[in-house]
Image: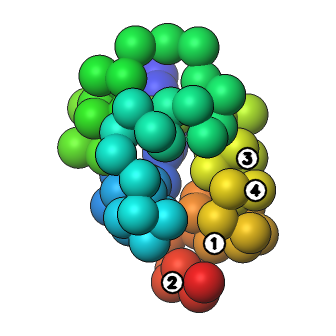
């Protein structure tokens, strides 16, 4: 049995990157992500779900509460 996952994480991490004006490679460096930059694409397209620590790094980079990313009922407010 799989755990339920938020459905809007992909569009939200994409919106964060675009708001920051960064390429996927730049975003990888901004959040100190050690994986391939292609993983950023997988997150944005919803193919993969980032770890909680990666989501926390996105939240910190955007200076928003983590809750705005993981709660499907909340919109991103920059």
Q: Which residue is mark 2?
A: 75
Circle 4 sits in a helix, a strand or a loop, which is it? helix
Q: Give me the residue at 63% from left, 72% from top.
A: 68
Image marks 2 and 1: residues in contact by CB distance under 8 Å: yes
Q: Give the image quarter of residue 67.
A: bottom right
Q: Nearer the viewer, mark 4 or mark 2?
A: 4
Drawn side of residue 25 relative to residue 16, left or right: left
Mark 3–mark 4 Cα distance, whole angstroms, equals: 6 Å
Q: Give me the residue at 50% from left, 32% from top.
A: 28
Q: Give the image quarter of residue 78.
A: bottom right
Circle 1 sits in a helix, a strand or a loop, which is it? helix
Image marks 4 and 2: residues in contact by CB distance under 8 Å: no
| Vertical position of residue 36 compared to residue 27: above or below | above
| Nearest the eye: 26 or 68 | 26
Q: Nearer the viewer, mark 3 or mark 4?
A: 4
User: What label sits on residue 56 in the rendered view?
Assistant: 3
Q: Which residue is mark 1?
A: 68
Q: Nearer the viewer, mark 3 or mark 1?
A: 3
Image marks 3 and 1: residues in contact by CB distance under 8 Å: no
Mark 4–mark 2 Cα distance, whole angstroms, equals: 16 Å
Q: Nearer the viewer, mark 1 or mark 4?
A: 4
Image marks 1 and 4: residues in contact by CB distance under 8 Å: no
Badge 4 local density, few (<14 within 10 Å), some, or many (20+)?
few
Circle 2 sits in a helix, a strand or a loop, which is it? loop
Q: Please say whether residue 11 is visible from this viewpoint.
A: yes
């Amino acid at each position: 049995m799989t755990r339920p996952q938020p459905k809007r994480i992909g569009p939200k991490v994409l919106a964060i990157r675009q708001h920051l004006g960064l390429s996927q490679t730049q975003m990888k460096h901004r959040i100190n992500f050690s994986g391939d930059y292609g993983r950023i694409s997988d997150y944005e397209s919803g193919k993969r779900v980032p770890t909680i620590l990666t989501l926390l790094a996105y939240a910190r980079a955007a200076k928003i509460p983590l809750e705005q990313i993981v709660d499907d009922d909340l919109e991103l407010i920059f």
